[in-house]
Amino acid sequence: MYVKLYNKEIPGKGMGVFASNLIPEGTLIWKLSNSRKLSKEEYNNSPENIKKDAYPENDHYVLALGDGESWNHSCDANTWWTADDELSARRDIRANEEITYDYATTDIDPNIQYTWDCKCGSSNCRQKLHWNHILKPEIYNVYKGHLPTWVEVFVKKNSFKNILAC
């Protein structure tokens, strides 16, 4: 199935990516097709708009280039990882529904340790997003088996420790 998407401005939120047609559960929506490796030094010296599109992998960072940078967070995301570089529909996604993923599944860099207010509006909104939320069992268990390999390694290494209080 070919997935047709479009970008649209969301008032108070910025750009978002939306489904043009119904996307059935399990359908591949996005595959990383263009990226660049950054050393930790290159990453640290990069502007924030570059850092937000990069993720840690082993001893370097991967900067995702091209489509996907406008995808927003939801605490009840409609996609999840089906490979290290693929997002698929977690459930059926209606036409004109925003495509989202849970930032807890990738934004785990202990060098940044971000916290920000969540405005996703889902019924299970966590209100605050923390860099290590994937370590919370109630979040990890939702995505177990649908995380990039490097996130699974991070979770196993940290064994549900050092979780910030919400």
Image (cartoon, rainbow, N blue to C red):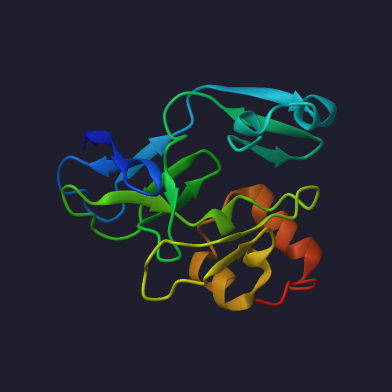
Q: Return the x and y of residue 25 as percentages of the image width and height.
A: 27, 56
82 and 53: which one is in front?
53
Residue 124 higher or lower than 157, as above or below: below
> How many labels sit on residues?
0
Q: As drawn, is 127 to the left or to the right of 12?
A: right
Residue 152 x, y percent position in the rendering: 66, 57
In the drawing, does residue 44 fall left or right of residue 86? right
Please state which of residues 19 and 91 is positioned toward the viewer in this rendering: 19
Q: Residue at x 23, y 51 (%)?
A: 97
Across and down, in percent, residue 112 comes to 76, 48
Quarter of the picture holding the C terminus: bottom right
The part of the image, by quadrant, that contains residue 29 is top left
- The one of 150 and 166 positioned closer to us in this rendering: 166
Extreme-front residue of the structure:
12
Q: Residue at x 45, y 65 (%)?
A: 75
Is residue 38 depicted above or below 79 in this figure?
above
Q: Quadrant of the N terminus?
A: top left
Task: Examine the image and state in which quarter residue 103 appears.
Answer: bottom right
Q: Is residue 79 left or right of residue 49?
A: left
Where does the image place residue 7, in percent across and percent down from the top left? 29, 34
In front: 100, or 86? 100
Residue found farthest to the right: 41
